[in-house]
Image (cartoon, helix red, strand yellow):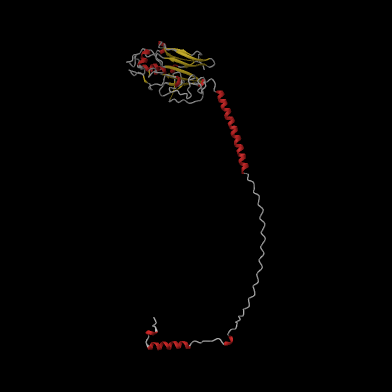
Amino acid sequence: MKKSGKNMKPEELAKQEKERKSLLSDVEIHVMPASFAQKKATVKELPKPAPKPVPKPKPVPKPKPAPKPVPKKKSKAPFIILGVGIVLITVLAVVGYFVVQSLNVEEEEVTDDIDGDGIIDSEDNCPEDANASQSDIDDDDKGDVCDSKDDRPEDVVEPGPGVDTDSDGLTDVEEDLYGTDDRNPDSDGDSFLDGNEVFHRYSPLSTSGATLLDTGAVEEFVSSDEVFRFTHPTGWDVSEAVDPAEGVQEVVVSTNTNASFSIVITPAIETSFPMSIELLTKEGYVVYMSSDERTSVVVTDSFFYSFTYDLDDEVTVDFLQTFQMLINSFYIIAL
């Protein structure tokens, strides 16, 4: 900060004055001459530069004409869809026609339906009671709706062999039939078991070799068309089923119980038999026998003779040896 003159010492003032004079000596002061006083000053204007030439505007190019629109190609899809639709409608119409016709045919065929359950009377297991499901729990061809009885067996019992006390091959029931001793396996004492003699058609009560037919224990049956014959215990009934054109078709031999023997005659055809035993009868015929020995088929060139032991409701097989005797006695009189 500079000091004012009042506060400065003489030496400092002298120094300051000296510096001022030195500064003034370096400055030149020019004074305008008197001749120039009151004269208007003229200022020469500098020449203006020549204007630059304005360039000619570039010609604006004429716009290109817009391209003509390319006409769109018409799509064939609508025509294809239309065609498919027409075909589909036609097919549906044809199918519908045939469906209606088939329903009409079915309606025409469903006649004589008294109970109105949709099952014609000839095929209805309850023609007078509606039973559209045709339920038949006991399988007796009578519908449950109109069948108050359940014919199903309470227990299915497999039949067993008859009682044979003396183990001679004849059951005690057969011992009574032939008059033999059910506690003596050889009633006539000829060293042959009673059952074995009956099987071979011999009398189990004769030591002379007499046959069952000789002693009257059995009798002979001859078919009404005189084609075949066989023997059966005396007193048993025999019935025939006869076709006027074909002759005897079936023979049934009734025992003195509910069991029976049947013989069914059918024309011989090439076939195999589901039988486990093949043997010859005493008359020389080939016979195929089931393992339980209750079904056999005698085979000839012209006919099959099917023998069946029908137990009905019997639970024991009491006449098996007699059934085998009947088959062994079977003989074809005329072919």
Q: Position of residue 34 (x, y in %)?
A: 57, 87
**Residue 109 in view, yes or no:** yes
Towards the viewer: 74 or 162 = 74
Q: Quadrant of residue 190?
A: top left
Q: Is residue 204 above or below residue 133?
A: above
Towards the viewer: 139 or 3 = 3
Give the left or right position of residue 38, taking residue 223 as reference: right
Q: How many marks?
A: 0
Towards the viewer: 209 or 213 = 213
Q: Position of residue 16 (x, y in %)?
A: 41, 87
Give the left or right position of residue 182, taking residue 71 as reference: left
**Residue 301 in view, yes or no:** no
Q: Quadrant of residue 58?
A: bottom right
Q: Is residue 133 above or below residue 59?
A: above
Q: Position of residue 315 (x, y in %)?
A: 37, 19
Q: Quadrant of the N terminus?
A: bottom left
Give the left or right position of residue 182, taking residue 300 as reference: left
Q: Position of residue 300 (x, y in %)?
A: 49, 21
Give the left or right position of residue 182, taking residue 220 as reference: left
Residue lying at the far left of the rendered structure: 183
Q: Is residue 194 above or below residue 48?
A: above
